[in-house]
Amino acid sequence: MPRHFLSTEDWSRAEISALLDDARLLRERPRQDRVSGKTAAFVFFNPSLRTRSSFQIGFSQLGGTPVVLDAAGTWPLEYVEGAVMDGEPEEHAKEAARVLSAYVDLIGIRAFPKFQDWEAERHDPLLSAFVEHASVPIVNMETIVHPCQELAMLMALQDTHGDLSGKTFTLTWTFHPKPLNTAVPNSALLAATKMGMNVRLLIPDEAYRLDPRFMEAGERFTEEAGTSLTVTTDIGEAYDGADAVYAKSWGRLDQIGLPMEQRLTPEDYRRFIVDEEKMALTNNATFSHCLPMRRNVKVTDAVADSPRSLIIEEAANRLHVQKAVMSQLLGAS
C-alpha cells in the first residue's frame, strides 16, 4: 500500500526533519527533474489561493504534470459506506478514488468539514474514503488538519530560531466575525509539540479547547520530549517569555450544527488581538499566521509588518515543503 501524507501526527520527528532538510535543498534549487513523466491530481472541494498555486507550481517544478480539479460546488461526492444515493451526489468516492488512481501517480485532497456533525466529521470521512479506495499516495491539502501549512511554519521557525527544542510556542486564539475551521490550530499543536517545543494554548474560555484527539496527541508528544503543553485563558501568562507567537481563529466545537446566528463570537473577545503590548511581554518573539489574515482584527499592522513577522516566509515555504512531501511519497527525494 502507498504511504500517504495526512497529518504530521503520522510522521516521526526524524522524518519531519528530513522533509524540512529536503525543502531547504529545493528552495536553493527549485527546478529539479524528480518526477518526470508522472502526473498528480489536486482536487479542491473548497477554494484556495496559496494551496492551489503552490501545489500546481511545485509539481511542475519537479518535472511532473499537475491536473487541478475544481470540485467546489460542482462535484458533490458521496463517501458514506452503504449510502443510498438518491440525493445530490451522483458519484461515490469508491469510484472517484479508483478512477483517478488509474490516471495519476498522486492525489491531493482539500475538503473542509461542513460543521454539521462533528462526531462524524472529526474522523475526516471524505479524506479517509480516498485513502481507503485509492491505489496511489494521498496528500492532505487541508481537511480537519493542515499538515503542509505547519511544515511551512516549522521551516520558518527553524530558519529564525534554529533548533526548536525547548523553545516556547504560544498558540493563541484570536477574534473573527464567524467561527472558522480548527484545522490549522490542530496541526500547529501537533507540529510544535512533536518538534520539542513547550506549547501554550491560549483560549478565551474552556469551550474553545481543541478536539481531545489532538490535545491528547500533543500531550503524548510533550511527554516523549520532556516538554510541556499548557492551556490557559490568561493572556499575560501565555505571552510571558514566549519565543514564538502563532495566531489563528477557530469556532467552538460544542456549537457545531447550530444556526450561525447562535454561534456568534462575543465582542469582548476582540481583546485577544495580537498587538504590540502583548508582544512586548515575550522574549522578542516571532509572529506568524497561516493567512488569510484579517488585519487589525486578529493582529495589528504594527505586529504583522514588524521585522519579527514570518507571515510571508511561512507562506513562501509552502512551495518548498510540499515539493519535499511529494518527492518523498513518489520515491524521488
Image: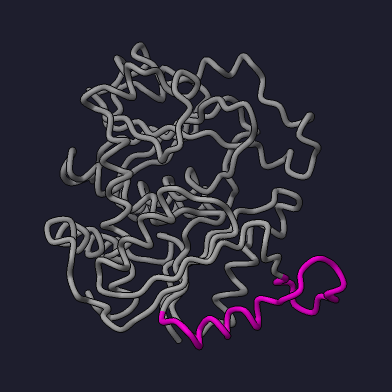
Relative to 257, is 65 above or below? below
The x and y percentages for residue 286 are: 27, 30
Q: Residue at x 37, y 61 (%)?
A: 55
Question: Considering only vertical position in the picture, is 186 above or below 33?
Answer: above
Q: Is residue 295 magenta?
A: no
Q: Residue furthest top?
A: 277
Provide residue 26's location: percent of width, then percent of height. Answer: 18, 61
Q: Position of residue 34 (x, y in %)?
A: 22, 76
Tell whether 214 sits left or right of 90.
left
Compare residues 102 and 17 and report the one nearer the observer. Answer: 102
* Residue 80 covered by magenta stretch: yes
Q: Residue 260: x percent and y percent?
A: 76, 34
128 and 49: which one is in front? 49
User: Which contiguous range is marked in magenta?
Assistant: 78-105
Task: Tell me: 311 left or right of 296.
Answer: left
In which quadrant is the C terminus drawn? bottom left
At horizontal 66% and vertical 25% (from top left) the residue drawn is 265
- Label total for image: 0
Of 323 and 124, nearer the camera is: 323
Determine the residue positioned at 54% across, 60% down. 44
Q: How is the image coloured?
A: one colour
| 330, above or below 297, in the image | below
- Quarter of the picture containing the N terminus is bottom left
Residue that appears at 71% across and 65% down: 76
Displayed quadrant of residue 153: top left
